[in-house]
Image (spheres, rainbow, N blue to C red):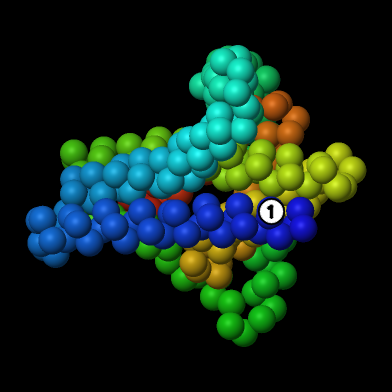
């Protein structure tokens, strides 16, 4: 039963992300047209709105539903009070400020992730259907410069890592782990949660070579979340990874 509940959390997160992209995408296409929609500034607006809607559906809506259920079951005024925003955020790994340990752990995690990802990609490259060189579509044209490049940098290197860490290593990891702890040991819950979150993170990228790569990164990110108790080092590692990819793709033009 707890495994099914954990899988439902994964489905909810994945479905919310897809629905958010479709809703925002179709509305913006209708408002601005296909030609304007693919422009960097419009793509950036689409990305931000999609991320915001996804966070509302994944994080805010479940909390409101849970608070309403608790309030309906308990009659005392104290019991009716919902969990404070500070406590709720702490539960998904957002508490205090990033420490020097978080900052130092990020580049170390980057090294571990690169070694792990290289090994996994090499393993999957043994299969004929796996194309390690397939280019990832990140929504921005490769040949951009000036303000357009700055906009792409903001979305890819800043916004995406923050939102994705809050959703996957923050909300989803916490939900799955807390669910599994009801039946399994702490070690087993951590391992299963890590694998499920990383599998979901890989699938949501909808591309084999990218999925394998980010699966490896997520394994490291979940481990860092467990070590530090927050998602800050994970955000920094994710930014570092996306920053390197951005430099290679948009500055050097290496695809």
Q: Nearer the viewer, residue 146 or 152?
A: 152
> Relative to 239, does residue 79 appear above or below in the rendering?
above
Percent from the top left, x then y, of residue 34? 14, 64
> Which residue is pictured at 26% across the width and 49% down the height?
46
Residue 221 in sight here: no
Q: Which residue is mark 1?
A: 6
> Relative to 157, does residue 228 appear above or below in the rendering?
above
Give the class, few, some or many, for how many residues have Cα within 10 Å of label 1's Cα (few <14, many ≥20): many
Q: Is residue 115 left or right of residue 204?
A: right
Percent from the top left, x then y, of residue 250? 33, 50
Q: Nearer the viewer, residue 114 or 92?
A: 92
> Which residue is pictured at 61% across the width and 45% down the height?
172
Quarter that holds the C terminus: bottom left
| Among the 4 quarters of the image, the one containing residue 51 | top left
Percent from the top left, x then y, of residue 23? 29, 57
Q: Secondary structure at mark 1?
A: helix
Q: Is residue 144 left or right of residue 171?
A: left
**Which residue is most to the right?**
185
Q: Nearer the viewer, residue 159 or 24?
A: 24
**Which residue is most to the front?**
75
> Which residue is pictured at 51% across the width and 34% down the height?
68
> Which residue is pictured at 51% across the width and 21% down the height?
85
Quarter that holds the N terminus: bottom right
Percent from the top left, x then y, of residue 164? 49, 43
């Amino acid at each position: 039963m707890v495994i099914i509940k954990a899988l439902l959390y994964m489905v909810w997160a994945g479905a919310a992300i897809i629905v958010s992209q479709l809703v925002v995408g179709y509305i913006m296409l209708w408002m601005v047209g296909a030609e304007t929609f693919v422009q960097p500034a419009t793509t950036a607006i689409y990305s931000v709105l999609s991320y915001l809607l996804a966070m509302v559906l994944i994080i805010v809506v479940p909390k409101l539903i849970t608070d309403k259920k608790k309030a309906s079951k308990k009659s005392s005024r104290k019991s009716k009070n919902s969990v404070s925003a500070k406590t709720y955020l702490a539960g998904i790994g957002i508490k205090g400020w990033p420490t020097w340990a978080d900052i130092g752990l990020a580049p170390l995690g980057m090294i571990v992730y690169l070694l792990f990802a290289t090994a996994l990609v090499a393993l999957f490259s043994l299969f004929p259907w796996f194309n390690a060189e397939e280019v990832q579509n990140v929504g921005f044209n490769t040949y951009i410069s000036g303000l357009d490049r700055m906009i792409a940098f903001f979305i890819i290197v800043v916004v995406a890592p923050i939102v994705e860490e809050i959703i996957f290593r923050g909300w989803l990891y916490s939900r799955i782990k807390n669910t599994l702890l009801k039946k399994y040991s702490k070690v087993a819950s951590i391992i299963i949660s890590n694998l499920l979150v990383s599998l979901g993170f890989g699938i949501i990228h909808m591309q084999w070579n990218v999925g394998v790569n980010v699966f490896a990164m997520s394994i490291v990110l979940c481990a860092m979340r467990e070590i530090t108790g927050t998602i800050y080092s994970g955000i920094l590692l994710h930014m570092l990874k996306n920053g390197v990819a951005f430099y290679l793709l948009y500055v050097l033009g290496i695809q």
